[in-house]
Amino acid sequence: MKTGLHVPPIVETPASLAAVSTWRGRWDSEADTEAFARQLAACPALAHATLALHGDLGAGKTTFVRHLLRALGVRGRIKSPTYAVVEPHSAIDCPLMPPGEPLLIWHFDFYRFNDPREWEDAGFRELFATPGLKLVEWPERAGPFLPVVDLDIDIQPDDMSHIHAADAEPDEARQVRLKARTPAGQCLLDAVTA
């Protein structure tokens, strides 16, 4: 897995914004995506975080989520929530949780939302208020109704993969950008960039 640069704020910012930092990196293959997901899954801050997943159709958001859920201990079939809007999961033997206590996970996909008010009408406020991990694809479609996001993950196909690595699979290489938005998000960013 290639590493990226940790970019600190350029100018002095208020304390509430000082925690916002960005990392840019690259996944040459799906194996790199899986390794990144495993690294993220080892961070205790993930257990109650909200991650916003950005990227075009086919960028690899759901593939990343599948690897992350497997790394957390989710068993069985992991479906994309494109039609259901939300898929609940639980990880029974998740090392981030006390023994016997499952990690509750909700995977949202707001791609089909036409109006951000659909988020409110669907009753998602209650789900976001409960403990557990929330993974949100197409968060911009929920508009201002989406609660605070801890970490933004932007995944884009890397059209220049043939220049970066001779052995990179063009269909698998991805450019990745992480942006921490909260102290928990900063812990997650630090965990995968250390």
Image: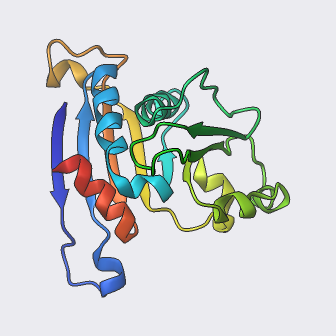
Residue under the image location 44 percent in, 62 percent down? 150
Nearest to the observer: residue 176 or residue 98: 98
Position in image of residue 26 (x %, y %): 25, 35
Position in image of residue 133 (x %, y %): 53, 51
Side (left or right) of 119 relative to 147: right
Nearest to the observer: residue 170 or residue 119: 119
Is residue 60 shown to the viewer in this render? yes
Residue 125: quarter of image: bottom right
Side (left or right) of 38 relative to 117: left
Is residue 137 shown to the viewer in this render? no
The N terminus sits in image quarter:
top left
Residue under the image location 52 percent in, 44 percent down? 100
Q: How many marks?
A: 0
Residue under the image location 59 percent in, 21 percent down? 76
Side (left or right) of 86 relative to 158: right
Position in image of residue 184 (x %, y %): 38, 65
Position in image of residue 134 (x %, y %): 56, 51
Q: Residue lying farthest right?
A: 121
2 versus 53 height, above or below: above
Q: Residue lying farthest front?
A: 99
Q: Residue lying farthest bottom?
A: 14
Residue under the image location 20 percent in, 80 percent down? 11
